[in-house]
Image (spheres, rainbow, N blue to C red):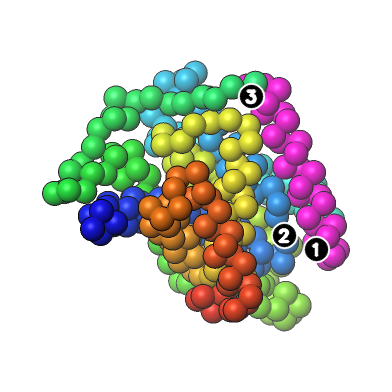
Amino acid sequence: MEFLAQLPQNLVSGLLLGGMYALIGAGLALVFGVMDIVNMAHGAFIMVGMYTTFVLCTRLRLDPYLGLLVTAPLLFGVGMLLHRLLIERVAHASHMNQILLTLGLSVALVNLVQLIFTANYQQIRTSYSDAVIRLGSITMNVPYVISFALATGITLGLYYWLMHSEFGRALRATAQDPMAAQLMGVNVRRVQSVAFGLGMALAGAAGALLTPVYYLYPTVGANFGLKSFTMVVLGGMGSVVGAALGGVTLALAESVGQMLVGHELKDAIGFVVFLLVLLFKPAGLFGGQRA
């Protein structure tokens, strides 16, 4: 009876978190789907987005959600620059070389942030940090609701843009067959550079939306980075829509599962789901179509 009484609250909490997970998974899937790049630095860029928002809030007194307007474009530019300087050099190399390069980039970013901000936990407090919305027995924290709404809006906007814009068609063509896309006049190098920049922008946006609801510390992105791979596997390797749905599924599984195994083992639920999907449905729960 206690389980059933708590279930609606946990389902709503899981859904709110799932909106942010969807944004995280979509960013990683976009890079993998278009470029076939295994980006182990995705979690580190989420962390950079969180600290960028933290600086904007503490130094410039900017609301964390307004900081999103700075963080996402900044990470987009950094992503395009890194693609031209580093990622492009391993674009046609083995996945192992890609993993080693992006893992090294992740370690460098984490240590740089630790050098600047120390390893101390940080937190952003706003006038609405403790505000809640009550719907009967269900309680929703206002920052979670705002983050969910913005993350959902960005994810849906990304999907609409990919499906209906000229560049979206070029991006999907590049994901399906880069050589054929190039023969049709698509600037594949530019498309891949923008795709990597967009992936980093989505990571930065997710970091900005996580900042009002999570503590900050230099290795905070590691957990989200690992979970993003679980989302991509759940949704089908390289599928942006699938990864977004995988993020919602993972968040709901964690939220409901923690009632059974406790908060301490909540993160293990995602990795159990990850292994089960790889064993029994390697193409993902929502199919395996790329981009």
Query: Is residue 2 placed above or below 191 in the rendered structure?
Result: above
Quarter location, residue 177: bottom right
**What residue is drawn where x is 46% and y is 71%?**
164
Q: Nearer the viewer, mark 1 or mark 3?
A: 3
Q: List the residue tagged with mark 3.
A: 119
Q: CA distance from mark 2 to mark 1?
A: 6 Å
Q: Of callouts 2 and 3, which one flags the residue occurring earlier in the amino acid sequence?
A: 2
Residue type at mark 1 is His
How packed mark 3 is, by other alpha carbons closer than 10 Å (few <14, some 14-19, many 20 or more), is some
Residue furthest to the top = 59
Residue type at mark 2 is Val
Q: Position of residue 16 (x, y in %)?
A: 35, 51
**What residue is drawn where x is 32% and y is 53%?**
10
- Determine the secondary structure under disc 3: loop
How packed mark 1 is, by other alpha carbons closer than 10 Å (few <14, some 14-19, many 20 or more), is some
Residue type at mark 3 is Ala
Q: Position of residue 284 (x, y in %)?
A: 56, 75
Q: Quadrant of the C terminus?
A: bottom right
Q: List the residue tagged with mark 2.
A: 38
- Determine the secondary structure under disc 1: helix
Asked if the residue at tag 3 contacts the one at tag 2, i.e. Cβ–Cβ closer than 8 Å, the answer is no
Q: Position of residue 49 (x, y in %)?
A: 56, 38
Q: CA distance from mark 1 to mark 3?
A: 31 Å
Q: Which residue is nearer to you in this view: 158 or 165?
A: 158
Is 94 contained in the magenta span? yes
Q: Of callouts 1 and 3, which one flags the residue occurring earlier in the amino acid sequence?
A: 1
Q: CA distance from mark 2 to mark 3?
A: 27 Å
Is 101 contained in the magenta span? yes
User: Which numbered tag is attached to residue 95?
Assistant: 1
Q: Which region shows up in magenta?
A: 91-117
What kind of secondary structure does the magenta stretch mostly adopt? helix
How packed mark 2 is, by other alpha carbons closer than 10 Å (few <14, some 14-19, many 20 or more), is many
